[in-house]
Amino acid sequence: MLFRRISIIAAAALLFCTVAVSVAKAQEGRTVTDFSLTSPTNATVTLSSYASNKAVVVVFVNPNCAFSKLYQSRLNALTAAYSGKGVQFLFINVPINLEATADATDADKLKMKSTGSDDYPYLTDPGQKVSGLLGATKTPEAFVLQPAENGFVVRYKGAIDDNAQVEAYTKEHYVAQVLDNILAGKAAGVTDKRAAGCLIKRM
C-alpha cells in the first residue's frame, strides 16, 4: 500500500513538471501581432512601429509600488545600456492591489526606499488589453519580445533579475542575459522567472 502511494505521488510530481515545462515553452514561443498604448502626450504608440528593432522590452510598473521603486535605477541602467543597440523599452503604468499582493508584507517594509528617479516615460494601457494579452500579473514584470515575420515572439517573461530587494546582491540579470543572447543571434536562454512585486489590479 505504501509503495503504491509513493508511486502515485511520484507520477503526480512528474506530470506537474511536464505541464510546467510545456507551459514555459508555449509562452516562450507565443507570437504577438500588435497592440496600442497611449503616451503621456496622448499619442498612440504601437508595437508594430518597432518591427525594425532587435528587441522590445515591455515592463509593467507602478510608481506607487515599492518594488517598482526599488528597480528604478536598474531599469534606467538597462535602458541606457541597450537603447543604442536596437532595443526599445516600453514602460506601462498599471494599477496595483497591495491588499491582495502575496508580497505585501515585504512591500510594506520597503515603501520608503527608492533607488532613484524614474527617467522613463510612462505609457498607459487602455482597458488593460496589453497586460491581459501578455499575461502580466505583477509590477515590475518584464517581457522581452523579438520581431519576427508574423509579429513579435515572446522570448522571456518575468523578473528583471534575481534580487528585488537588494540590488548589490543580484547574481542573475535575467533580462540583460536574454537581450545579450538575442543580440548575439543565440537562443534567449532562460524564458520564465517568477517576478516579485505588487499584484496588478484588474478593473
Image (cartoon, rainbow, N blue to C red):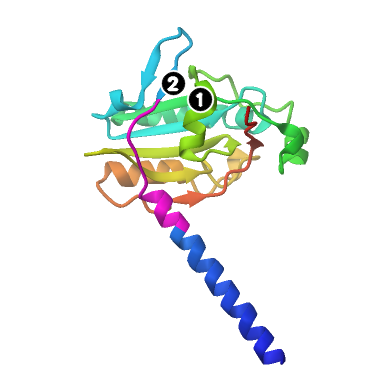
Mark found first going from the N terminus, 2 or 1: 2
Return the residue nearer the eye: 119 or 203. Answer: 203
Residues marked 2 and 1 touching at CB (< 8 Å): yes
Q: Nearer the viewer, mark 2 or mark 1?
A: 2
Say whether residue 25 is magenta. yes
Which quadrant of the figure has residue 51?
Answer: top left
Return the residue nearer the eye: 48 or 144. Answer: 48
Q: Which residue is identified by label 1?
A: 92
**Amino acid type assigned to the residue bearing label 2 in the image:** Leu
Residue at the image position 62 percent from the left and 33 percent from the top: 200
Q: Which mark is residue 71?
A: none
Task: State the CA–CA distance, disc 2 to disc 1.
Answer: 8 Å
Residue at the image position 70 percent from the left and 31 percent from the top: 97
What count of labels does the image hold?
2
Say whether residue 168 is magenta. no
Which quadrant of the figure has residue 50?
Answer: top left
**Where is residue 88 shown, x and y percent of the image?**
36, 27
Q: Which residues are magenta?
A: 23-35
Residue at the image position 51 percent from the left and 35 percent from the top: 132
**Viewport quadrant of the N terminus:** bottom right
**Amino acid type assigned to the residue bearing label 1 in the image:** Ile
| 203 sits left or right of 28 in the view | right
Q: Which mark is residue 37?
A: 2
Could you say whether the residue bearing mark 2 is in a helix, strand or loop?
strand
Residue 123 in the image: above or below residue 129:
above
